[in-house]
Amino acid sequence: MKFKYTESLIKEVFRELVLHNSDGTSGPITDFKMEHPIMGMIKKANGEKSLVNCVIDIEEEGLLVVPMHLFRADKAIAAWYFSFCSVQHLDIKDGWLHSTITLRNEGNDGDYVFQIRKRSPKNLPNQEKNLKYVIDRLAEKFKVHRS
């Protein structure tokens, strides 16, 4: 049982989740290559308050969110894929210590709010660089102003 998140552990856990739940078909989650993972927290999911650690990554067509087990860093709960064509609203707040991404997806009743710590901890040395990449890609894709 692992308690600290590392980039290699995050990628391994995601691959295990995809292989375990995949039925051999292709799709946005099974084909996703996790190249810019960042650790964050789900503050709100589908309009309901939540406090769950998650891994977030971005690709050309969408955003991947992998909620993690509350007490284990080596266990993922699920994988959510937000296709950019189905995102109705996106807001990025760039704070001093955290960045907050709020999005509303087509077909869902409420917003999803993700809070990401800006500083790179010792065990996730690329957090700051990957967060900048994800936020720049979202801002470019949706033409949003960062507040």
Image (cartoon, grey):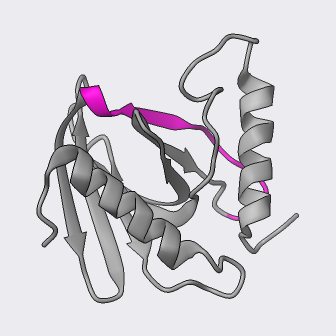
Q: Nearer the viewer, residue 54 or 95?
A: 95
Quarter of the image for residue 85 reads: top left
Q: Which range is magenta?
A: 71-85
Q: In the rendered view, would you say 32 is above or below 67?
A: above
Q: In this view of the protein, can residue 53 be seen by the observer? A: yes
Q: Position of residue 133 (x, y in %)?
A: 42, 63
Provide the major secondary structure of the magenta segment.
Answer: loop
22 left or right of 62 in image:
right
Query: Can the viewer see residue 72 in this picture?
Result: no
Q: Residue at x 42, y 38 (%)?
A: 60
104 left or right, relative to 61:
left
Where 39 falls versus 79 (above or below)? below
**Percent of width and height locating residue 67:** 56, 49
Q: Quadrant of residue 136?
A: bottom left
User: Residue 5: x percent and y percent?
Assistant: 71, 70
Residue 96, compared with residue 47, is above or below; it is below
Q: Is 124 displayed left or right of 114 in the figure?
A: right
Quadrant into which the C terminus falls: bottom left
The residue sitting at 62% across, 52% down in the picture is 35
Front in this rendered view, residue 122 or 105: 122
Q: Residue at x 63, y 61 (%)?
A: 70
Q: Magenta span has 130?
A: no
Magenta stretch encompasses residue 78? yes
Spot occupied by residue 48 in the image (x, y as percentages of width and height):
30, 48
Residue, far right: 1
Where's the N terminus, which quadrant?
A: bottom right
Residue in the picture at 26% in, 27% down: 86
